[in-house]
Amino acid sequence: MDATEITTEDDYTNAEEPPSMDGLPVIGSLPAMLDSPFEFSERLPDSRGVVRVRLAPIDLPMMPSELYYVDHPEAIRRVLVDDHASYRKPDLAKRAFADLAPNGLFVAEGDQWRRIRDVVQPAFGARNVQRYADAMVTETVRRVDEWDDGEPLAIADEARTITSAILGRALFSSDFTAIADSLRSVVDAMGAKLDVPASAVPTWVPTRTNRRFKRDVREFERVAADLVRKRRQVAADERPNDLLSALIVATEDRTLSPAELRDQLFVFLFAGHETTSLALTFACFHLAANPERCERLYAEVDALDGDPSIGALDEVPTSEHIAKEALRLYPPSVEVAREPTEDVELRGYRVPKSAGMILPVYSVHRDERWWDDPESFRPERWEREDVPSHEYAYFPFGGGPRACIGNRFATLGLRLVLATIARRYRFGLAPDRSADLDLRITPTLAPAEPIELIARER
Ligand code: HEM
């Protein structure tokens, strides 16, 4: 079948039931998935790319009774790109965001999604790249200049500080130093809130997690309102040309409602912050754990005439290879979720309307069918033109119209921050630290334990 054809009723009827994984009687596969989410996909039965996984006997508040695992790059491309109009974000994602940002770009659909995406898209366009690149280097230098030679660093905290400073400077033309703590609290509270089993408890139930969550959301709202109020005080023709101004102008001319403004602030402060800082944490960890694999980066940055810049990026290709390899092995968004709006056929299998679908980024990125030596950190693999072996064997930013709007911003940031750090420091592992990394899902992919790295001046 031609990959760009939309499924017809006949395709669906003629298609097969996908292989299924039922797990234990009554309790299904949920215990297996919670117990070892990272090995879970290895236990799935063979298929052409779609497996039906029975999780529980009935639908639970934040957990459907079954899910369809879609792990073949062809099928992933059809869901995200070719047939995207037949899929939407799952109800579950909408429920998870209901208390956070129900009108946020992340879960909006149809006309509302298009309207919001049109408002924010220009802020991520090529026109702004030069200014963003300058902010990325300046904010990194500002932070790393405070590091002492040989000092142990809690690298996730450092990465968060650098990322939020960049986000503030580039997209909000603001100094986020003063609000970094409250941003961090909201991000942590949101992680705790979206975690299983806390996510199954409605927000009105006064649990500790919910009380903390509500307090932190209120604090976030205060910070966001303050950003908006200060910007509104600036005359329209003197406002910086950034994401915040675009959102405010769109609210003033009623393209966006006040609730939509508030929700976009939430989405951009959260989505832009947490994912990128995790990617940076993983990349820095590998600079320390696999120094021989990263050696070229140091030679490249030493040959530069000063700090890296947008114009000199071509001279530091290894920064891109390290960023891509970190995002392959440790994709902060471990999976992309969808549900079909009609009965669909995928690789000859039936997937019924409204079924929960998981496109498992993490396991596709480590699948031997698409990757040589998939578990090893090998940035040099990206020098080859035939990598990835299939376009959708690598999709840390999703794909199609709903692909990450911050893709280029995040990749540019990772490259410039890594190169700026490498000009000044080499990372080493703390003496008792192994080069293996335990992971957890928070719901983003994060190190299970804090990572300490030693920064040595070069
Ligand atoms: C390494 C960093 C990042 C990763 C791994 C990442 C990952 C993703 C993924 C996988 C999606 C698609 C979700 C889906 O299809 O269901 C997405 C969407 C999105 N991301 Fe990112 N992201 C990153 C950085 C950023 C940044 C820096 C921003 C903004 C400042 C951002 C804002 C968004 C938004 C608003 C969406 C929703 C887009 C839409 O539906 O139109 N992300 N991201």
Image (tube, rainbow, N blue to C red):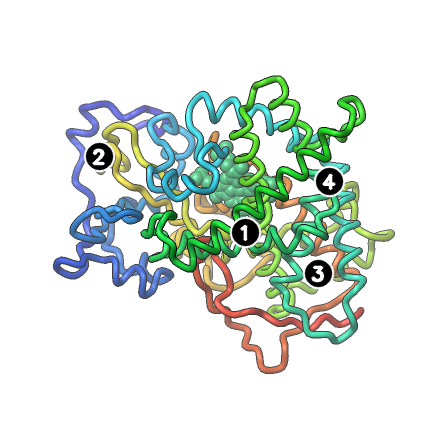
Quadrant of the frame with the C terminus: bottom right
- Give, as a three-letter code, the residue at label 2: Pro
Q: Earlier in the sequence, mark 2 or mark 4?
A: 4
In the rendered view of the protein, which quadrant contains the N terminus? top left
The residue singled out by tag 4 in the image is: 132
Nearer to us in this view, 185 or 151: 185
Q: Quadrant of residue 15?
A: top left
Q: Secondary structure at mark 3?
A: helix
Residue kind at label 3, given as amino acid type: Arg
Question: Around disc 4, counting alpha carbons within 10 Å, would you say few (fewer than 14), some (14 to 19), or many (20 or more)?
Answer: many
Labels 4 and 1 touching (C-beta < 8 A): no
Instruction: Compare marks 2 and 1 and give the one earlier in the sequence.
Output: 1
Which residue bears the numbered disc 1? 186
The residue where tag 3 is placed is: 296
Q: How many C-alpha atoms fall within 10 Å of the one at disc 3: few (<14), some, or many (≥20)?
A: some
Marks 3/1: CA–CA distance = 38 Å
Instruction: Name the residue rendered at 60%, 65% in the picture.
Output: 285
Which residue extends farthest bottom? 432
Marks 3/2: CA–CA distance: 49 Å
Gap between marks 2 and 1, in whole Å?
37 Å
Q: Nearer the viewer, residue 428 or 5?
A: 428
Q: Is residue 118 above or below residue 360?
A: above
Q: How many marks?
A: 4
Give the SS element for disc 4. helix
